[in-house]
Image (cartoon, helix red, strand yellow):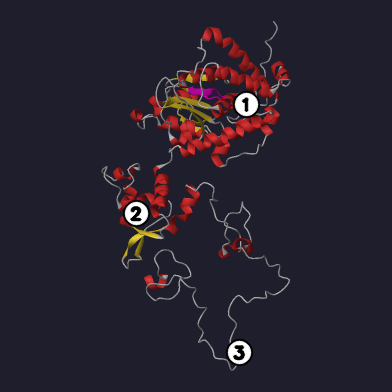
Amino acid sequence: MTPPPDPPPPSAPVEPDEVAAPVETADAVEGAEVDGAQLLDDLVHALVRYVVLPDVHAVVAVVLWIAATHGQRLWGHAPRLVIRAPEKRCGKSRLLDLVEALCHNPLITVNASTSAVYRSITAGDPPTILLDEADTVFGPKAGDANEDLRGILNAGHQRNRPALRYNAATNTVERIPTFAMAALAGIGAMPDTIEDRAVIIRMRRRMPGEHVQPYRVRRDRPGLDTLRHRVSAWVRAHAQLLEAAQPAMPVEDRAADTWEPLIALADHAGGHWPEKARAACLALTGDRDGAGDVPITVRLLMDCRTAFRGAGALKTADLLDRLTADEEAPWATAGPRGDALNAMKLGRMLRDYDITSAGNIRFPDGTQAKGYRAADFADAWARYCPTPGLSAVDDEVDEDRDGYPSHLSQTSLPWSARDGSTPWDGSSRPSTPSRPSLTSKATAGTRGTGTPPEPNAPVCIVCREPLSLDDGSHTHPVCSA
């Protein structure tokens, strides 16, 4: 009797975050011969045939996001796609249907438990998660019931952010991958932590003159399937180049993480796509930052900047009055009981930015009171709500840091260039003395007095001596103590 053949040797275990190398297939070889720019143009025509998007930037972003799903294993970040609308019948679900037909390995649902999503994400070939009616999951009525699901979507934006679960049956800790691209569609805004990691498309209801072709699965899906296979073959054929790409990004930080796969694809496709992709990136990230979807504390910083109106310091009561006087701002009802914002809550909201009230500030009217100095807000204003068109950080040299500029990523101008004077190269002594010369023998002295103050120079309202720097209190620090 012939003995049974030996079983094949067990394969080496694969780590959850290990990325399998792309396999050369006939489709991949065929994709190498495809014109990438024309292929992306074909995706554009497929989308606009069935749905009206807000503008050309939204069309470019959705097309590049769909193409990026076919290269999930190549990216370090998995951008989210948020499709939101103010009302129903704006085309968000239709757009999600088209994304489902064209993206890689779609997993579409209208509701899912956290554990189901965990178990659906595989390490080697994760699905593209598509969540319709997301407002019922993350909307106001849901409250905090789906915080775990939000945590998955946040963590899955970046590779190597697994979830850990203890398996009592095997007495082991399981490492569950979370990395996967995801799209959410719903009415209203999604949680801010999700939108911060997302390409946001704001859908609108079609106008009477805007017409699209009805989408029918039996009739239209085969053509979209063919287009999906072409996109997948093209991405796989150029996987090594795309994985090694380091495109020049028009944005920074998390926005750059989110848009990098899309920009890399656009650069590789060539044609007009690199320019259109960067224009879409700037437009959509600008729309997000300027649409009022900012944290309440950042809104407070912005409104405080308006309230100061050039003043060096404000009494706490005056600052609160100016904040609550704005009828379009939330401060008239931001108090602990729905009343006006009070001094205690104001201080608590500003404390995280290292801004605290100062005691006994002397004001021009001669009174002293607790209040806030504009100088204490300067760092937070520059970092969290910089004025458009101005540098967020002044590159001034700090002598306590051995002459290094405060922002190492930018070149600090020499003092002479910033002051408007002619740069001195050190080859000769300055011909004009920068300070009065010392008196000589047999010449009447000046009793050691300094340079007379310039006309209209600010003086201390206590000691009447000149002020080298007026922060709005019109007093020397020693005099106001």
Asked which secondary structure carries label 2, the reply is helix
Position of residue 98 measured from the top left corner of the image (x, y, whole percent): 53, 18
- Amino acid at circle 2: Leu
Position of residue 237 measured from the top left corner of the image (x, y, whole percent): 70, 23
Q: Distance between the residues labelled 1 and 3?
A: 81 Å
Q: In front of the other: label 2 or label 3?
A: 3
Q: In this view, does 41 lie to the left or right of 295?
A: right
Determine which of the numbered discs, if any, sits on residue 71 in the image: 1
- Amino acid at circle 3: Ser
Question: Of marks 2 and 3, which one's residue comes earlier in the chain?
Answer: 2
Q: Quadrant of residue 222?
A: top right
Q: In this view, does 53 lie to the left or right of 312?
A: right
| Stretch of the chain drawn in magenta | 120-130
Q: Can residue 261 be seen in this view?
A: no
Position of residue 3 measured from the top left corner of the image (x, y, whole percent): 69, 9
- Amino acid at circle 1: Gly
